[in-house]
Image: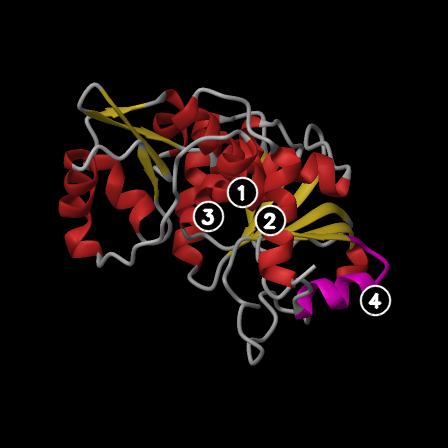
Amino acid sequence: MHNAAYAALGLNWRYLAFEVDPKNLRAAIEGARTMNFAGLNLTVPHKLLAVDMVDELDASAKTWGAVNTIKFENGRAIGFNTDADAIVTSLRQDLKVELRGVKVLLLGAGGAGRTAALKIGAEKVAELFLVNRTASKAEAIAGEVKKQFPSVKVFVGYPQGEIDLLLNATSLGLKPEDGSPMDEKQFSLKQARAVYDMIYKPAETKLLAAAKAAGCRTANGIGMLVQQGAKAFEIWTGQSAPVAVMRRAVEGSVYGV
């Protein structure tokens, strides 16, 4: 999507993928700086590690405690987080969900889950339910949300009644053999009005298929992917991102359309 965007704007830039072992992340960042890269994107497990490896944290990275985008400027590495805003934008555009005052069930307490939980809290939802395989991780994030956003009611565990949104921030669903990311004995999808899965490949996970069958509005994570990429594009280039071009490129690459 970045290369399509560069071509659309006539920029002689190139976006490349590199596999970096976590133990070599600091050296990789320094190498990119030395080679005059404009910036970097980082994915798991690098987002939390990079917080201590940049020279400066943008307000977004400070707020959400993770770095997924680095910009090199005047020899300095500046860390940003473009994930959090991308979640909210995609929920609004792809599911027509406004978070203020709603009830949300969030599955997952890893890096993506933590960022999502804090951003959801910042949007002043009424109630947030956190579920994770390791309950202690969910409890730790619940404590963070309560501390930063005391008006939000936060619970660890499944809700008893209906909710407005179920958000999957786990990786369960990436593989065909994966089971459901939630305990269907404790929660029925018929209790959810909308379901968002951060996974975008496959386009329809087992969770989304079951949610659609239960009558829920559904969306996968392709919108979030595009939105976080568009923001990174703007950070690096200083130009408005051609979002439609980027989305078409992603859909063509991932789904062959």
Identified by mark 3, the residue type is Ala
Q: Determine the residue positioned at 31% across, 34% down.
A: 39
Lower sequence index among marks 4 and 3:
3
Q: Quadrant of the C terminus?
A: bottom right
- Contact between marks 4 and 3 (CB within 8 A): the answer is no
Q: Which residue is found at the position 58% from the left and 63% from the top?
A: 201
Dominant secondary structure of the magenta stretch? helix
In the rendering, at what x and y percent does residue 148 appear? 45, 26
Please tell me whether residue 210 belongs to the stretch shown in magenta.
Answer: yes
Q: Secondary structure at mark 2?
A: helix
Residue 249: mark in rendering: 2
| Tag nearer the camera, 2 or 4 | 2
Are discs 2 and 1 less than 8 Å apart at CB?
A: yes
> In the rendered image, which residue does mark 3 sit on?
112
- Are the two marked residues, 2 and 4, in contact with CB atoms closer than 8 angstroms? no
> Which residue carries the number 1 mark?
4
Residue 252, numbered circle = none
Image: magenta residue range = 206-217
Q: Which residue is mark 4?
A: 213
Which three-letter amino acid code belongs to the residue tagged 2?
A: Ala
Disc nearest the viewer among 3 and 2: 2
Q: In terms of sequence position, does the residue under pointer 1 or pointer 4 come before the other?
A: 1
Residue depth check, mark 3 versus mark 1: number of the one nearer the observer: 1
Looking at the picture, tell me which residue is in the foreground, 232 or 110: 232
Lower position in the chain sequence, tag 3 or tag 2: 3
Tell me the distance, in whole angstroms, between the alpha carbons under discs 4 and 3. Answer: 26 Å
69 over 15 or under it: above or below: above
Q: Residue 204 location in percent, x, y?
A: 69, 64
Answer with mark 3 or mark 1, whichever residue precedes in sequence.
1
Contact? badges 3 and 2 (CB < 8 Å) = no
